Amino acid sequence: MKNKIIIYFWLIGILGFSQSNLQFEKANSLYNKGKYEAAITAYENILENNLHSSALYFNLANCYYKLNKTAPSIYYYEKALKLAPNDKEIQNNLSFAQQMTVDEFDAIPELSTSKFFNKSANMFSVNIWAVICILFMCLFVGFFIAYYLSKNTKPKRFFFVMGVISILALVSSFILLNKKINLDSERFGIIYPQEINVKTEPNLRSDTAFVLHEGTKVQIIESYQSTWLKIKLIDGNVGWISNNALKEF
């Protein structure tokens, strides 16, 4: 009976996968025919079934780009890039879509050390960094035990050096693991309204700090009463907007 249940769920999984592939191919066919609105509906139907992939987000972004819809095209390119951060095609198309935005800001120069740590941390996922930390910890314990049990000077010196190297590698990996956790916890969103006034405080009566337009990427650094979000731009400016003014990715 148990085997029959396993086979039953396995068949359901296979059928569901095949159906999603057929839906994806149908959506791609609509896109290739230039029926972008219909293709968007087809792609979004797949998303409603909790089936996500970089290819799906990428194709959906392409549809919106073809329709000159700045905000959703950038939003879905960013979603695709989050799943495939090293994909050059996604990066290129995102840069083309960003050229349609009105706002331009000068980014605060990033320190070379900070850039190095960010790039290094993004080499692997949190889970992989955790496994690397465990691996170096096991190596350190192994070398320590070998050093303790060794009687001769030469192997004792070797195990000591390898133990020092492994503990340094462990500390470095742990630092990068925490850096990756912090990077993954950062929240970003895309401004959707054509134009919006960013406030100095989380209320409509406060002064306008600056104006943003659709498609601009912002960092979300704080929320207030589930209705306001404090955002930060790449140039360091901060302000408050309504939480329905952007879409988080």
Image: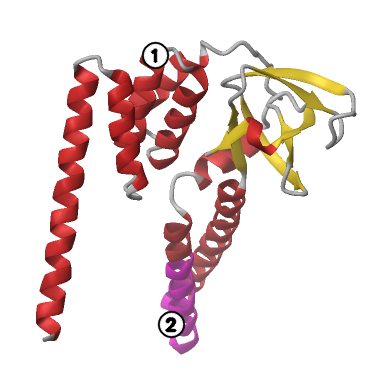
Question: Most prominent secondary structure in the magenta stretch?
Answer: helix
Disc 2 marks which amino acid? Ala
The answer to whether residue 151 of the structure is visible from this angle is no
Query: Label 1's element?
Result: loop
User: In front of the other: label 1 or label 2?
Assistant: 1
Where residue 87 sits, quadrant-wise, is top left
The answer to whether residue 101 of the structure is visible from this angle is yes
Identify which residue is drawn at 75% across, 17% down.
Answer: 211
Q: Is residue 158 above or below residue 28?
A: below
Dot 1 corresponds to which residue? 67
Q: Is residue 139 part of the magenta span, yes or no?
A: yes
Disc 1 marks which amino acid? Leu
**Which is nearer the eye, 103 or 176?**
103
The circle on residue 210 is: none
The Cα atoms of the two marked residues, 1 and 2, are separated by 66 Å
Identify which residue is drawn at 84% across, 21% down.
Answer: 208
Dot 2 corresponds to which residue? 146
* Mark earlier in primary sequence (1, 2): 1
Pinpoint residue 20: horizontal percent, then vertical percent: 21, 45
| Left or right of 46 in this view: 91 | right
| Left or right of 147 in this view: 190 | right
**Which is nearer the eye, 242 or 10?**
242
Q: Residue furthest right?
A: 206
Region in magenta: 133-156
